[in-house]
Amino acid sequence: VAPHIPEPMLFDLVRPLGAAKGELEINTLVDHALRGKNTEWAPEIEYAYSDGYAIELELPFNDLSVAEYKFALQGTFGVLSPQIIHGWQIIGRYDRHDKAYLTDTLYLNGMRFPGNWSKWSIFNMFGMRNNYSEKRERFGGLLNNSIFYSFSRQLTLGFEINNEIPRWEKWRYRLVPQVHYDFTPHTSLQIGGGPSKLHEDRKTEW
């Protein structure tokens, strides 16, 4: 039995690790910088085609213009203990603005703490990004860490850190405190905000 671990809000899973065959999720991520003029949003559909395996189709927009075409595949290695589960994820996308093909390959690991700490859980993702259009910075590191506290079956608080390392002397990040609220077993809202330096050509965004 897979432990229950919330999903990171921004660097999303396809489905939770260990998802049962037939699970389907439809959601939209909306991202807006307080001083920015454009709104980024991305409708997506996620489907578990077999126990522990899922696919995702996503269409990121910048305002009303399609920015990327994105496809993801995810699998579950298994349960290491009643509290720990791990797996993998591969993301492929085409950036229409830069005319670039990119792939992300990631190892996934989640843990729900035992005993008196059972309301706490963590989720870690680390791997590599391959930008086929770049020569100097073709390969880059990815590291994403999240920690969650479940107040109840409906309310979860979290803190997510997204890291991109295009080369060793550089580091780009985004820090996002967040709230997850389940209105029903099949309907939920996640909201959060924080500083971002993922765009190296811009100052810190909020």
Image (cartoon, rainbow, N blue to C red):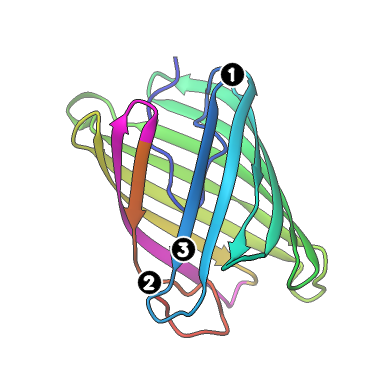
Please provide the residue range marked out in magenta: 168-187
Q: As drawn, which residue projects farthest toward the front? A: 64
Q: CA distance from mark 1 to mark 3?
A: 29 Å
Can you say whether 53 is above or below 200 in the image?
above
Pinpoint residue 202: horizontal percent, then vertical percent. 52, 84
Per the image, label 3 sits on a secondary structure element best described as strand
- Return the residue at label 3: 31
Disc 2: CA contacts within 10 A as few (<14), some (14-19) or many (>=20) = some
- Return the residue at label 2: 195
Badge 3 amino acid: Asp
Q: As drawn, which residue projects farthest toward the top? A: 1
Front disc: 3 or 2: 3
Can you say whether 123 is above or below 37 in the image?
above
Which of the two residues, 3 or 195, is positioned nearer the viewer here? 195
Among the 4 quarters of the image, the one containing residue 95: bottom right
Which numbered disc flags the more N-terminal residue, 1 or 2?
A: 1
Pinpoint residue 185: horizontal percent, then vertical percent. 34, 25
Pinpoint residue 148: horizontal percent, then vertical percent. 30, 43
Among the 4 quarters of the image, the one containing residue 138: bottom right
Q: Quadrant of the C terminus?
A: bottom left
At 49% across and 31% down in the image, what residue appears? Answer: 16
As drawn, the label of residue 22 is 1
